[in-house]
Amino acid sequence: MAHDNPGINYLAMDISPDVLGDARRNIVRAYGGEEVRNILLTRGDIEHIRDFLAPEDRVERIYISFCNPWSARPKHVKRRLPHPRQLMQYRDFLVDGGEIWFKTDDDTLFRESLDYFAACGFEAVHISHDLHDEGFSPNYVSEHELKFTAQGVPIKLGIFRKLPEAPDIDPVRWLRPAKTVRDLENAPD
C-alpha cells in the first residue's frame, strides 16, 4: 500500500515487537532494499493512542486489520480496537469525512462493530461480508488474510466515514442498544 502511494505517510502501530519485526521484514522485501520514507513503525498500545496522536494531528484514514476479537469473556469486549471507547479516541484526530477501514475474519466482532461505528458517529460507506467473493479493490492482502481465506473463511470489510457531529455517548459505559443495526438488517421486510 505504501509502495503504491509514495505521497502518503503511513504509521503502523502494534503492541507486539514481534508483529512489528514481521512488518519490517515485509517492508524490506516489498521495497527490494530501497529506502522507505513514507512508513513509520511504532510500538505502542492503541488504548493509549492519545499519547501518540493529538487533536492537532490530522489523520485521513485508519486501517484496523484482523484485531483480536476479545470474544471469550464479555467483560473483555471493551478491549476491542473498534469498541466505542477506542472509536471516540480516533475521532479526536481523524478529519471530518475521514475513514476507518475495518477488516476481520470474525463474524461476531464484525456484526457488533456495526453498532459501535453507528453509535460513535460514523456512517457505513461500504459493507462486505465476503470481500474476496465480491472482488473489492483495492484490497491489500495480509498474511493473516491469506491464511483465513485459504481455510474458506470469508473476510469482512467495513468502510466507515466520520460524520462531523460527535455523538453524546459515554464510550466507557456504552452498552449495545436493544435494537441494533444487526437487528434491523435481519428484520423481515
Image: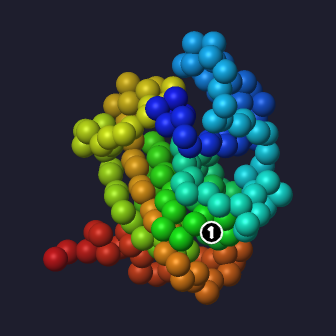
Which amino acid lies under the numbered mark 1 shown in the image of this protein? Arg
* Residue 165, horizontal then vertical, whole percent: 54, 83
User: How far from the left and from the top, in percent, is residue 140?
Assistant: 44, 34
Q: Is residue 35 above or below residue 88?
A: above
Of residues 142 and 105, which is closer to you in this image?
142
Residue at image coords 42%, 57%: 159
Left or right of 66, for residue 81:
right
Q: Which residue is mark 1?
A: 91
**Quarter of the figure with the C terminus:** bottom left
Which residue is at a point 39% across and 47% down the rendered structure image? Answer: 156
Crowding around mark 1 (Cα neighbors within 10 Å: few <14, some 14 to 19, many 20+) is many
Compared with 10, 147 (above or below) is above
Q: Is residue 119 visible?
A: no
| Residue in the image at 58% along x and 81% along y | 166
- At x 32% / y 51%, what residue is drawn? 128
Look at the numbered disc 1 and give the secondary structure of its residue.
Answer: helix
